[in-house]
Image: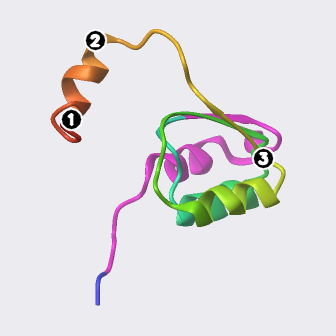
Amino acid sequence: MSWCTAVHAEVCAILNAGRRCRNGLLYTTTFPCFQCAEKITQAGIGRIVFTEPYPDPYSKKRLELAGIKLTQFEGVRSSSFERIFSKVNPD
């Protein structure tokens, strides 16, 4: 059995924002996992802008069923992003 004790950034943002989440916009580096997708839905967030996709079709479907608009960020990234994340997911 695996017990994850991490608090993902999306959940941390929801906890910090409280009621201000309702119809809000969430920016995140990676597409939310299913657990975060459920919390985002319950918080009433209306739109998500993400940088990297996440290979979980269930989280995407959950967000789409809730009517949450999903947008993949396309634009200029900081050089730090490439330096940090290229080590995590090498080509």
Would you call the spot at circle 2 few (<14 residues within 10 Å), some (14-19), or many (20 or more)?
Answer: few
Look at the picture and state if 55 lies above or below 2.
Answer: above
| Secondary structure of residue under mark 3 | loop
Q: Which of 28 and 69 is in front in this view?
A: 69
Q: Position of residue 35 (x, y in %)?
A: 54, 66
Q: Position of residue 10 (x, y in %)?
A: 53, 47
| Nearer-N-terminus badge (2/3) | 3
Would you call the spot at circle 3 few (<14 residues within 10 Å), some (14-19), or many (20 or more)?
Answer: many
C-beta proximity under 8 Å, tags 2 and 3: no
| Secondary structure of residue under mark 2 | helix
Q: Which residue matches tag 3?
A: 68
Q: Where is residue 52 in the image (x, y as percent from the top left)?
A: 45, 37
Marks 2/3: CA distance?
30 Å
- Write down the region rendered in magenta: 3-27
Q: Give, as a three-letter code, the residue at label 3.
A: Ile
C-beta proximity under 8 Å, tags 2 and 1: no
Q: Give, as a three-letter code, the residue at label 2.
A: Ser
Q: Where is residue 90 in the image (x, y as percent from the top left)?
A: 18, 37
Q: Give, as a three-letter code, the residue at label 1.
A: Asp
- The residue at 52%/45% (across/down) is 31
Look at the picture and state if 63 lies above or below 30.
Answer: below
Is residue 19 magenta-colored? yes
Q: Which residue matches tag 2?
A: 79
Question: Residue 91 got which mark?
Answer: 1
Look at the picture and state if 9 lies above or below 52.
Answer: below
